[in-house]
Image: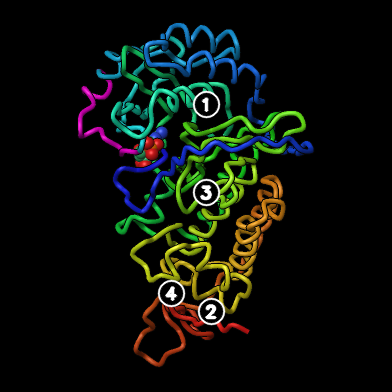
Amino acid sequence: MTAAKCCSVEDSIILGINFSHKPKSKAHHNGSESSSRPIGPMPSFRRLQVAYSGSLSTCSSQRINEDLAQTFGSDLFDFQLVELKGITQNFSRSYLLGEGGFGKVHKAYVDEGFRPGLKPQAVAVKHLDIEGLQGHREWLAEVIFLGQLRHPHLVKLIGYCCEEDERLLVYEFMPRGSLENHLFKRLSISLPWGTRLKIAIGAAKGLAFLHGAETPVIYRDFKTSNILLDSDFTAKLSDFGLAKMGPEGSNTHVTTRVMGTYGYAAPEYVSTGHLTTKSDVYSFGVVLLELLTGRRSMEKSRPKGEQHLVDWVRPYASSSRRLRYIIDPRLGGQYSVKGAKEMAQLAIQCVSLNPKDRPKMPMVVEKLEGLQNYKDMAITCGLWPPPTTKSSRVNGVSTKGGYCKPSPVAPIRKS
Ligand code: AMP
């Protein structure tokens, strides 16, 4: 969602600036995953968005479903509010999974026979808060994009409900919740290095799939709270409320109102409103840095030079000697030094100020998959603070090479 109500560090940005549109040469994209459903005829997305993006009263659930089915052969279920109230015990607090910018999310279970063709399973029911930050337009974008897109790294939309001014979405249930909760909630167990890598690869594949269509889909709100995790930590992208069709024909970008999340949005997008797939690549780089450091993209409670993650990391990322000062101390030194170094370099490439210097997502996937081959686990640093004993072994692991003190520590010499 654009902004989690609960989390003050994430500020949504809606600047509402109109920018001019300059066509240029055609950008080339590829890299969809074979097990996924190909992205369909894009003009239909636009037609549906235009047809239903008006006031709430224009939305008839039946009409949308018929239209989606006609256009895409959609297999979405059109639920009634009374059915969703029933399976969530009238949206009981005890079924609450979380709350984002769209509204509350409840867990529910659909039994055998709930709807013909729907297998018994746990689901997540998202209920639009009509006074919230997002509205009918975002609900519709989610139905249109996720109704059509199927991929192992996109969360599956099962159905929706549209009655009077009620808007709901029903998804497959993701047992491990969001990456944000795993990385940043104090009480959560730290994610091991291999799991972080797996999550990064899964999320990168999701983005590569979206960018790989004939007319690319720009996700526009890539961040840890929009990456959901399955029981085996398979990462899936959720929340297509801000997704946009990419440029067509000879255009290099689309021009839009600037929307997204501070700390993740690409600087050229914020300053010009020009949106390309490379804007998503920038946000991906920020998430990679969050996985490496265990710090949020923006932390206003930190000292001045450390508030903006990208700026803070840049001088450290180029050398493995310096890098250890910024690696998430919660990893306890258990990570591949080579892998971390290359991941940091890749992240820095992704957050290049010039969008042309950023890699394309299929290249990012390839690079990250290569890091899985590194079996060296760091013994160059251990948990901070170091033990008071003079022994050079802790828990059977050599501490030769010293301990990593969590930042802020290492001064960067300006040479
Ligand atoms: P969102 O509105 O998408 O930001 O969701 C708010 C919170 O609800 C997330 O941080 C998750 O913890 C939870 N959530 C959302 N969708 C799902 C899902 N499909 N499965 C499990 N938990 C979910």
Q: Give the range drawn in magenta.
A: 86-100
Magenta region includes residue 90: yes
In the rendered image, the quadrant that contains the C terminus is bottom right
Q: Nearer the viewer, mark 2 or mark 4?
A: 4
Viewed as shown, does residue 409 lie left or right of 73?
Answer: left
* 2 or 4: tag closer to the N-terminus: 2
Label 2: state its secondary structure: loop
Task: Give the CA distance from mark 1 to mark 4.
Answer: 40 Å
- Residue in the image at 63% along x and 29% along y: 36
Task: Name the one closer to the observer, 167 or 333.
Answer: 167
| Kind of residue sitting beneath label 2 | Thr
Residue type marked 1 = Leu
Q: Name the residue under label 1.
A: 146
- Disc 3 vs disc 1: Cβ atoms closer than 8 Å? no
Tell us which disc is closer to us: 2 or 1.
1
**Label 3 C-beta lies within 8 Å of the nearest ligand 1 atom:** no
Q: Name the residue under label 3.
A: 265
- Chain-order first, disc 4 or disc 3: 3
Quadrant of the frame with the N terminus: top left
Ranked by sequence position, the earlier of labels 2 and 1 is 1
For the point 47% across and 19% down, which residue is it? 53
Q: Tell me the residue that label 2 is attached to.
A: 380
Residue underneath mark 4: 407
